[in-house]
Image (cartoon, rainbow, N blue to C red):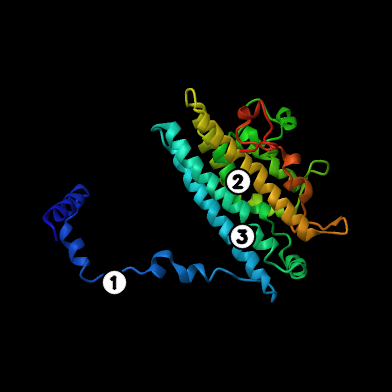
């Protein structure tokens, strides 16, 4: 072994207050790493548990598991943005390019379901999934909370219903996605929403407190005289995530859930046509960037 490498190894363990000898001797007995162990392939491939005998339910499950993994990658990038204080503009540009690529993957991947599942079989096995819903993706909510101040995730007409000094729970009571399962007239929650909030509401509150004044949008506002390139990347990501991806989701749902003009109910019970279509939600992470044009009509 070259002396310089051995010296660096000794220095590494010295900094940890450790004796390097047992670590080096351990290399004599350790097994070589394999791809399947490193990626944990066997565990990963054992996670699909269909509830029916319809073959395309397997496609449906794997697709959503892939989506959750992509969301995890996106959260990984966003966490680095909010935790970094070095050269914010360059960091933002690098991470936004990654976030846009991941979102593009989510957009194009819907064909896996739309073109890769039996229409008839889907409309049978989906009945066994009630009241589960993609609405219950916690990672989707985590990502939103990290990207923009929580007030931007509340419809403007609901802002007046907030207290003068709202806390995280007050915000969560009015957040846009809650309307998919909450009836303001009866003040009742759907089973889908109740199960979701029972499991994650306290975690969401922690994320909101953690992200206060420290979201991707807050980081962008710290940049003095942001370049046109950075602004375009911010808008491209905002449009891709909040318009293009929901619209593809909407069109896929429409393909499977409408027949002869009649729309079937979502498994979670939401009015999916209004909940999914961006023209109804009009959601944006970075509202100040859209003062002169519309996020719905943006073409990068």
The CA distance from mark 3 to mark 2 is 16 Å
Q: Secondary structure at mark 2?
A: helix
User: Quick one: 65 or 297, which is closer to the camera?
Assistant: 297
User: What residue is disc 2 on?
Assistant: 141
Return the mark for residue 31.
Answer: 1
The disc label shown at residue 168, or none: none
Which label lies toward us, 3 or 2? 3
Q: Give the SS element for disc 1.
A: loop
Q: Report whether 96 appears left or right of 58.
A: left
- Res 259 seen here: yes
Residue at the bottom extreme of this rendering: 53
| Residue 199, visible in the rendered structure | no
Write down the residue under mark 3: 64
Q: Position of residue 125 (x, y in %)?
A: 73, 69
Q: Residues within 10 Å of mark 1 (few under 14, many from 20)?
A: few
Q: Earlier in the sequence, mark 3 or mark 2?
A: 3
* The C terminus: image quadrant: top right
Percent x, y of residue 20 = 17, 57
| Dot 2 and dot 1 residues touching (CB under 8 Å) | no
Is label 3 in a helix, a strand or a loop? helix
Which residue does the image show at 74% across and 56% down from the upper left? 253
Disc 3 to disc 2: CB gap under 8 Å: no
Instruction: Measure how far apart labels 2 and 1 are at the Cα level.
Output: 41 Å
Residue 237 horizontal/vertical position (percent): 58, 40
Question: What distance separates the C-alpha of mark 3 from that of mark 1?
Answer: 34 Å
77 vs 288, left or right, is left
Determine whether 162 is above or below 27 in the image.
above
Displayed quadrant of residue 234: top right
Q: Is residue 38 left or right of residue 183?
A: left
- Taking the spot 76% from the left edge, 51% from the top edge, the residue there is 272
Q: Residue at x 69, y 44 (%)?
A: 177
């Amino acid at each position: 072994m070259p002396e310089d490498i051995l010296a660096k190894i000794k220095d590494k363990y010295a900094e940890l207050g450790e004796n390097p000898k047992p670590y080096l001797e351990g290399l004599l007995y350790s097994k070589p790493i394999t791809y399947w162990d490193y990626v944990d392939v066997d565990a990963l491939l054992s996670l699909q548990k269909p509830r029916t005998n319809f073959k395309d339910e397997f496609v449906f499950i794997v697709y959503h598991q892939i989506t959750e993994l992509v969301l995890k990658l996106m959260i990984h990038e966003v966490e680095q943005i909010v935790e970094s204080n070095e050269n914010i503009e360059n960091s933002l540009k690098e991470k936004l390019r990654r976030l846009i690529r991941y979102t593009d993957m989510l957009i194009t991947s819907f064909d896996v379901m739309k073109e890769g599942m039996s229409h008839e079989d889907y409309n049978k096995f989906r009945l066994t999934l009630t009241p589960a819903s993609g609405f219950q993706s916690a990672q989707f909510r985590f990502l939103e909370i990290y990207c923009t101040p929580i007030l931007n995730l509340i419809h403007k007409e609901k802002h007046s219903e907030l207290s003068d000094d709202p806390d995280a729970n007050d915000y969560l009571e009015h957040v846009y996605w809650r309307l998919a399962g909450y009836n303001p007239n009866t003040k009742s929650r759907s089973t889908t929403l109740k199960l979701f909030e029972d499991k994650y509401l306290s975690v969401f509150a922690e994320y909101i407190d953690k992200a206060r004044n420290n979201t991707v949008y807050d980081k962008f506002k710290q940049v003095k005289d942001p370049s046109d390139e950075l602004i375009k990347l911010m808008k491209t990501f905002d449009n891709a995530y909040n318009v293009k991806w929901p619209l593809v989701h909407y069109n896929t749902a429409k393909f499977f859930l409408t027949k002869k003009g009649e729309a079937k109910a979502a498994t979670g019970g939401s009015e999916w046509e209004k909940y999914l279509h961006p023209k109804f939600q009009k959601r944006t992470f970075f509202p100040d960037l859209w003062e002169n044009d519309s996020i719905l009509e943006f073409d990068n």
